[in-house]
Structures are given as structure tokens and as C-alpha cells.
Amino acid sequence: MIGEKWTVYWNEYSSNTYLYGSEITFHAKDDVEFKNVLMAPGTVIKQWYSRTNYQMQRIEPALPMIDGEGRYRVKVNIDCPKGEQWLIQLIFCDKYEAEAGRVSVRDEVSYFQCPLRTYSYRMQLMNGGITRFRFHDIEIQEVEYEAEEEEIKKTI
């Protein structure tokens, strides 16, 4: 059974975005063009949060609240040149902001379950050896275990 689905967009905020030498063009809500030929691999390009301190960061949370009991599917909609790669990191934190776990996503569709201690998390779009791309959105969807098993069987 498939559960609730959330769509994460790249908002026009310059905070939490790697700007040094970057050319960012916002064509539409779901079409952001990014170019930076000098950025080193492993650099965080954009970051989203499930919890924020508005007075300090001046941004609202862009990620849905999730729990450690559910399983989730993440679908990344990014167009990039052949041979270049992006990376998504999901970093889970406990209520004291200590890291409770981490998941790396390199495929267009991946499944994950966050640690039970998760209080908040952040998602990072990272440079995995990419100089340009078009970002559309990232979907996070809650899934039941049986639906996940069926999906995995289809891909094998």
C-alpha cells in the first residue's frame, strides 16, 4: 500500500545553496538550471530541512516530518549530462542534534527507513562529479513493506 507523498522543490532562497561561481536560473517552480564547472566533488550544492529556527535561518522547513517506524521511497528528478553524477544525503538527527544515521542515494528511485531516534533530518544535494544539471523535484513517499517488496521484485 502506498501512503502520503510530498514533493520538495528548489525554492529561490539563496541560503543553503552553494553560490560561489554558480549560475542558477529559475525557469519554473519545477525547473532550476545549475552550472558550476569549478566546484569540487563532495560539495553540498543545496540543503533542505525538516525543522528550522526561523528567527535564525529565515527559512521554513521544506521536508515532511517522518518517523522511524515507516518506510519511505525517494524519487529524484534531476537531468544531468551522461557520465556525470549527483548524490543525495539524508542525515538524521536526534533531539540533541547529534547525528543518528545517514542514507546516501545515487539512484533515481531508492528506499530508506530512518533510525528510531530521529527527531529531525536534512537532505543534501551533493556534487558527485557534476558540472551542470536541471533540478525538477524530489518526491518522498511513505510505503508499506509489502509494496516495497513488490517494487524490488520488479527491478530484479
Image (cartoon, grey):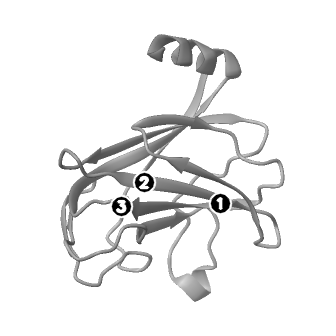
The label nearer to you, 1 versus 3, is 1
Rendered location of residue 8, percent (x, y): 44, 52
Image point (51%, 82%), residue name: 58
Number of residues whose C-alpha sits closer than 10 Å to that of mark 3, classed few (under 14), some (14–19) or many (20 or more): many
Which picture quadrant has residue 133?
Answer: bottom left
* SS type, badge 3: loop
Which residue is denoted by mark 2 in the rendering? 87
Among the two numbered marks 1 and 3 on one chain, the one whose residue lies closer to the N terminus? 3
Task: Judge from the rendering whether residue 69 lies leftward or rightward of residue 141; answer left or right.
Answer: right
The residue under label 1 is which amino acid type? Tyr
Task: Judge from the rendering whether residue 6 lies leftward or rightward of residue 142; answer left or right.
Answer: left
Q: Can I make out residue 31 in this image?
A: no
Disc marking residue 10: 3
User: Foreground: 5 or 98?
Assistant: 98
Image point (47%, 67%), residue name: 47
Among the two numbered marks 1 and 2 on one chain, the one whose residue lies closer to the N terminus? 2
* SS type, badge 1: strand
Between the residue at mark 2 and the residue at mark 3, the CA separation in whole angstroms equals 15 Å
